[in-house]
Amino acid sequence: MKQIIVINGEAGSGKDLFVTLCNELVQEKTGRDDLVWNYSAIDKVKEIAALCGWDGKKTPKSRKFLSDLKDLTDEFSNLSSRSIDNKINEFYKSDAQILFLHAREPEQIEKLTDTYDAYSLLVKRDNYSTDPSNHADKNVYKFSYDFQVKNPGDTMENYKKEVSKWLETAEKCFSAIEAA
């Protein structure tokens, strides 16, 4: 049963680590490492940013640059939506079962959840906050998410437990919907 999850959270909350841990748990259960995919609405934007001299580091200045560049490329050619559509088409043709799509803007999250019957997930990290440098980071909490996961921010083991709990809950939810 294929599922698309639109994932969001503040900078540094552990979104990529969440997907990595989810992949590890699925791999432990199935013996396969190709069932969980991870893709961001700004992956193509990052490629363009690198051509402009971006060194790949996520600083407040570079986050603003990436956000502004995404806005420009979306206004000019709808780049992020087109790249997401392409990734989703690849996903449906693959053996993968879960596709995590990173998206920041509430409007884009809503469009993705509506268009692709996807779920939304917010990752929160205890005792950690950032000073958002751009509108996308500032709007993280302006969406009503289907799921929330707390990254305790203390040990990898504790975070993996939280990811495992989410995966169990999500599997039950997906199975119940599929059966209906």
Image (cartoon, rainbow, N blue to C red):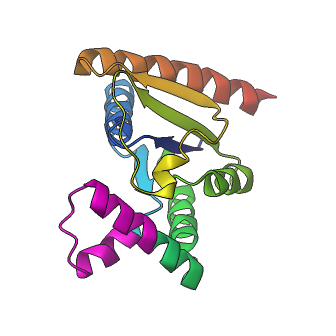
**In the image, is 162 to the left or to the right of 98?**
left
**In the image, is 178 to the left or to the right of 1?**
right
Q: Quadrant of residue 107?
A: bottom right
Q: Outermost residue, bottom direction? A: 76
Which quarter of the rendering shows the N terminus? top right
Picture residue at 43% right of the left edge, 64% below the top: 67
Asked whether residue 119 is in view, the answer is: yes
Q: Position of residue 114 (x, y in %)?
A: 74, 51
- Residue 74 is a magenta residue: no
**In the image, is 18 to the left or to the right of 73?**
left
Q: Main secondary structure of the magenta part?
A: helix
Front-most of residues 154 and 96? 154
Picture residue at 42% right of the left edge, 40% below the top: 10
Q: Which residues are magenta?
A: 45-69
Q: Quadrant of residue 28?
A: top left
- Residue 59 is a magenta residue: yes
Q: Is residue 77 above or below residue 102?
A: below
